[in-house]
Image (cartoon, grey):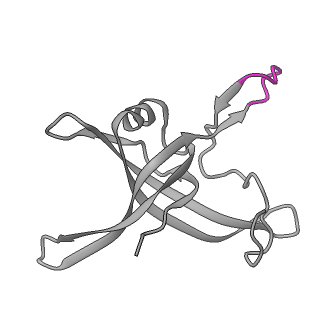
Amino acid sequence: MTIPRIAGIFRLTRDPELHFTQSGKAVATLGLAASDSKSDGQGGWQNIATLFIDANLWGQQAEYINDTCRKGDELFISGTPYTEQWKAKDGSNRSAIRMKAFTVKPIMHKQNTGDSSQNQQSNDVWGSQPSQDFGSLDQPPF
């Protein structure tokens, strides 16, 4: 059985954490969150659910994201989920679902600077409305 890839738009919950393996390969740990919202019918938004997950990103992409992205930035990410298991200090067995990220791309937002051709990354942290209203959860967004 093949583990499926997942893809979506996530926000960084903290700045990327860059580390290097003993062989010198870069690996970044990304704290991610994705929310599903819908219009409340009165001009506001209602949060339906939020997913928090950590992702690992390797190589040059890890270094690029570490250098260019900060907490609150939006990213398009695709990767494969996996379960990480460890033994806690108290001796109990622990586990968490993580993601091995394959594709990570920052989402650029146009700023109202008078020059419509200028793109910059969003600095909006968690307070923004979703870029689209996908309507009912029963209907796919396409």
Would you say the magenta stretch is mainly helix, strand or loop? Answer: loop
Q: Could you tell whether 41 is left or right of 3 in the image?
A: right
Location of residue 44 by image quarter: bottom right
- On screen, 56 above or below 17? below
Which residue appears at 79% of the width and 29% of the height? 112
Q: Could you tell whether 96 is left or right of 47 in the image?
A: left
- On screen, 5 above or below 122? below
Residue 14 magenta-highlighted: no
Which residue appears at 66% of the width and 52% of the height? 127
Residue 3, image x and y in percent? 42, 69
Residue 115 magenta-highlighted: yes
**Outermost residue, top side:** 115
Residue 129, image x and y in percent? 73, 54
Which residue appears at 47% of the width and 52% of the height? 13
Q: Nearer the viewer, residue 10 or 123?
A: 10
**Outermost residue, front side:** 1
Which quadrant is the N terminus positioned in?
A: bottom left
Which quadrant is the C terminus positioned in?
A: bottom right
- On screen, 136 above or below 43? below
Residue 109, image x and y in percent? 70, 36
Residue 113, image x and y in percent? 78, 23
**Outermost residue, right side:** 42
Q: Nearer the viewer, residue 67 or 14?
A: 67
Q: Which residues lie in the magenta part? A: 111-118
Which residue appears at 76% of the width and 68% of the height? 38
